């Protein structure tokens, strides 16, 4: 298997890498959470072995970010945090298995082999693109025609929802429920205000409008008029 080991302790990393290499696995290594996230998002791996306590982005946040972007690569957490609550938080963050340090290498190898036998998930979706509009789910950035567009968190969520439903008409109620988590009508113009603000950032200055108002129905993001 092609495995990414994200571990900042060099002795532990060497011990694991050498042992798994002897088992016939191909190892790549990262020593920080940020570097690990970059490699895990940009390359294809069969398994991620992730230390929870990492410099920069911690292991839990790293895995949560990957899972939020649709990356389903199996994850084995390694950690000195062995309490029940720690294990539960690791699994709830998206981990598939959890091994407490110190550990016997034979157990690590067995858990790696077990995770390798699981059916492979489809390739993760890390970005959305419509025409010249690009949205990166990992870096949380938006570009149109190569130009960076600065969006507020709610605007990003609104655009993501519109792009995931490109070509479809989305109603005001759908947006309230899926972007604002409102399951009632607040009787405000919050949707209209945010769509107008988003349209000014996404469409202003470009030859083709992407966000369209469908009179009496809602909104639609599409490349054609």
Image (spheres, rainbow, N blue to C red):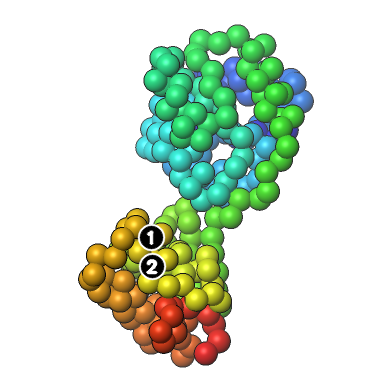
**Res 141 quadrant in image:** bottom left
Q: What is the CA distance from the residue labelled 1 to the residue labelled 2? A: 6 Å
Q: Secondary structure at mark 2?
A: helix
Q: Is residue 210 above or below residue 191?
A: below
Q: Could you tell me residue 79's position as x and y percent?
A: 46, 20
71 to the left or right of 35: right
Residue at 41 percent across and 14 percent down: it is 83
Residue 164, position as x, y percentages in the image: 52, 65
**Does residue 39 show up?**
no
**Can residue 1 be seen in the rendering of this structure?**
yes
Residue 196 numbered mark, or none: none
Residue 215 versus residue 179 in the image, above or below: below
Q: Give the percent coordinates (x, y) of residue 179.
A: 37, 61
Cβ–Cβ under 8 Å for marks 1 and 2: yes
Q: Secondary structure at mark 1?
A: helix
Pointer 1: what residue? 177
Q: In the displayed structure, does residue 18 sit left or right of residue 78? A: right
Instruction: Name the residue carrying label 2.
Output: 173
- Position of 100 relative to 21 (above/below): above
Question: Quadrant where the N terminus lies?
Answer: top right
Q: Seen in the image, is 184 located left or right of residue 223?
A: left
Q: Residue at x 50, y 76 (%)?
A: 169
């Amino acid at each position: 298997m092609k495995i990414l080991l994200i571990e900042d302790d060099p002795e532990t990393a060497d011990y694991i890498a050498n042992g798994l290499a002897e088992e016939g696995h191909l190892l790549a290594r990262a020593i920080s959470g940020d570097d690990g996230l970059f490699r895990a998002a940009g390359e294809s791996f069969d398994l991620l072995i992730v230390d929870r306590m990492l410099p920069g982005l911690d292991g839990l946040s790293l895995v949560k970010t990957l899972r939020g972007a649709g990356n389903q690569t199996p994850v084995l957490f390694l950690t000195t945090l062995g309490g029940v609550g720690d294990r539960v938080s690791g699994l709830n963050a998206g981990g598939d298995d959890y091994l407490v340090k110190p550990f016997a290498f034979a157990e690590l190898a067995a858990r790696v082999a077990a995770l390798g036998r699981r059916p492979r998930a489809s390739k993760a979706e890390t970005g959305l693109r419509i025409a010249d509009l690009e949205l990166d789910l990992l870096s949380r950035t938006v570009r149109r025609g190569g130009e960076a567009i600065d969006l507020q968190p709610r605007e990003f969520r609104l655009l993501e929802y519109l792009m995931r439903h490109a070509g479809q008409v989305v109603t005001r109620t759908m947006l309230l429920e899926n972007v604002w988590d409102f399951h009632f009508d607040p009787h405000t113009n919050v949707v209209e205000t945010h769509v107008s603000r988003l349209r000014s950032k996404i469409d202003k200055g470009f030859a083709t409008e992407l966000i369209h108002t469908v009179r009496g129905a809602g909104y639609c993001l599409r490349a054609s008029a």
